[in-house]
Amino acid sequence: MARPALNRSTPAFASVTALFFAWGFICANNDPLVAAVRRIFDLSYTEALFTQIVFFAAFGILSLPAAALLGRVGAVRAMLIALAAMIGGCLIVQTTALVPCFPLLLAGLFVLASGIAILQVAANPLAASLGPPDRSHFRLALAQSFNSLGVVAGVQFGAALILGDPVFEGAEPLLSETARTTGLAAVQRAFLTIAALVLILMALLWVVRRPIEQASPRATGAANIGQAFRSRWALFGAVTIALYVGAEVAIGSTMIGFLADPRTLGLSMDRAGAWLATFYWGGALVGRFLGSWLLTRIAAPHLLRAAAVSAVLLCAAALLAPGPVAARCALAIGLCNAIMFPTIFSLTLERSTASAEATSGLLCVAISGGAIVPLLVGQVADRAGLGWIFVVPLAAYSVIAAFAALAMRRLPRAPRSRAARRTRA
């Protein structure tokens, strides 16, 4: 009886994995967007990083309602609603052609991020559940590998379509009205292209909805969100997810400026964006495929601890080493980030006493808590310089290492086995 279930889950897992690619591609455009809006609107690093903060805010506001929505309508309908919201956000960005102001751009990004929040709440536990329970770490890491592939493609796309415009040559703010209009038009083109791609993905999801519905858990009614707040492991996992996402985003968002700094490498903006895509996000891509394979051979908590300790050491080297060495160490952190999100997520799902929907909702809400990390990094960059920004991620990775060490001592909790017994029954 197991083989037909496996056969049903394979096309469903492949379809869900395409969604991981899509939101990685979209979110990655925020890194070149930070560099672009700083010049278009003449912003500080802290102000420009609000393009990331609105994403965190959307996760904080929408993730728990998304968990309730998931429990009521099921994964497929929740994901279709998410994709529709993402298209709406991209279209709001187009209205900056009429009203060229930063808050309107942020509003469009918030709607876009709201759709991604719903998508994450639905897709992460779905990817983990589409197959044998003992390979959930592998499946989620593999799906996140394609998320990383989307990130690499997205950064390259944004760097080429946005920062590749001749108006962004040099490092000075775009002071003339014509230059600002041209720079903003490059941003609008990028998000219009994203809207078209999401529309295609929405159509594909509708076509393959049947295999996903057959292989995914049935909707059981609104999730009991309070369960997650009563689970110590759900809460600890939420804090750890927040610190990981905050550290990864903060480093990615400031990396272009860091590499372009004459004291580091002095690269041009578009070339720094290409380095970010190739080495930082590319390292995460390679690491996730490699990590997916390693998770079939090494216990997830052990691999997570090794990655977190390595990230701590690289942050320290980026702080203390001279420019070129610091740049290489900073870029190598992407490789360490590779398996962190899927491993933290699945370890928490295994050990939480709450339902998968409630735990997933809390973990996705926790992503919003990661906003404190880029805010702190922005403050450090503005006050002490880009060379000091790695102090904050170093502290975040230290907490992740502690989470992994505790997970090594604590076996998965009972709810998974009870669910398995219900499935067998």
Image (cartoon, helix red, strand yellow):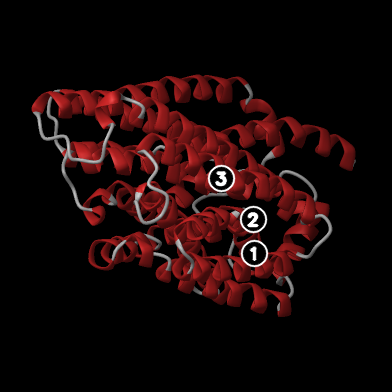
Quarter of the image where one finds residue 217: top right
Q: Is residue 174 visible?
A: yes
Against 68, residue 39 (above or below) is: above
Q: Position of 334 compared to 409: left or right?
A: left
Label drawn at residue 279 = 3
Front: mark 1 or 3: 3
Looking at the image, which residue is at 80% across and 50% down? 132
Please tell me in which quadrant of the rendered image residue 372 appears.
bottom left
Query: Could you say whether the residue bearing mark 3 is in a helix, strand or loop?
Result: helix
As measured in the structure, the alpha-carbon distance from the residue carrying label 1 to the one carrying label 2 is 8 Å
Compared across the picture, whether 226 is left or right of 347 comes to left
- Marks 1 and 2 close (CB-CB < 8 Å): yes
- Compare residues 369 and 36 and report the one nearer the observer: 36
Residue 339: which disc? 2
Screen quadrant of the C terminus? bottom right
Mark 1, secondary structure of its residue: helix
